[in-house]
Amino acid sequence: MGERGPAKTPTNIAVLHGHRKDRINQNEPKPGALAVEPPDWLGEQAVEVWHTLAADLKAKGVLTGWDVEAFASWCDAVVRRRHASKRLQVEGEVIELPVFNKNGEETGHRYAKNPWTLVLNEADAQMQKYAARFGLTPSDRASLSIGGGAASADDDLLTG
C-alpha cells in the first residue's frame, strides 16, 4: 500500500514555494548528467511541443534525464488533445448514428456523444496529471515566492 496523503512536492519546487527548511528533503536523490532529449518514440508534433518548453524546464531544474519519459507523455497528450479537439470542431460533440435491426438492416438513426470526446477527456486527464508534476499549471505557479523585488515575466528567476 502506498503512502497516504498528497504526493510530496519535489525539493526544487518546495524551495521555490518557500516551504520551511525543516520540511524540505535535503537528501533527495539527484539525477546524474543524463541527456534530456525527446525519446525516439515521440511523434513529430509532440517533439515540437517538447522543444517549446524543455529548455526552460531544464534550466529551472524541473526537467532532468529521469523525467524524460514523463515529460514526453505530457507532450504526447498535448498532441492527442489538440487532434481530438479539431475532430470535435469538424464533427460536432453529438453525432448521428445508424440503428440496425436483428437482420442487419438500417431502421433509423439515433444521436450519441462523439467518441472523440473520450479521447479528448483522457488526454486532458493525462495532461493535468503531468502538468502538475512539472509545475505547468497556474495553481502550481500561484504559490511561488521568490524574493528580490519585482521581476518581469521574461526574467529567468532561477538562473539569473
Image (cartoon, grey):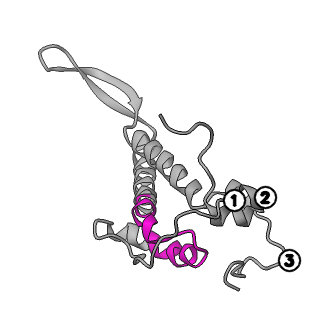
Select label 3 or label 2 by which is in front. 2
Amino acid type, label 1: Ile
Q: Main secondary structure of the magenta part?
A: helix
Comes first in the chain, label 1 or label 3: 1
Q: Is residue 1 left or right of residue 141?
A: left
Instruction: Give the image location of residue 140, x and y in percent.
Output: 68, 57
Instruction: Give the image location of residue 132, x and y in percent.
Output: 59, 54
For the magenta stretch, what is the residue range? 49-73
Q: Mark 3: few, some, or many residues within 10 Å (few <14, many ≥20)? A: few
Q: Specify the label residue 24 is tagged with.
A: 1
Element under disc 3: loop
Q: Specify the label residue 133 is tagged with.
A: none
Instruction: Give the image location of residue 141, x and y in percent.
Output: 70, 61
Amino acid type, label 2: Arg
| Residue 47 location, quadrant | bottom left
Badge 1 vs badge 2, beta-carbon distance below 8 Å: yes
Instruction: Give the image location of residue 20, x and y in percent.
Output: 78, 58
Element under disc 2: loop
Residue at 33%, 66% in the rendered image: 42
Which residue is labeled 3 in the image? 150
From mark 3 to mark 2, how far is it between C-alphas? Answer: 22 Å
Which residue is labeled 2 in the image? 20
Residue 143 appears in the rendering: no
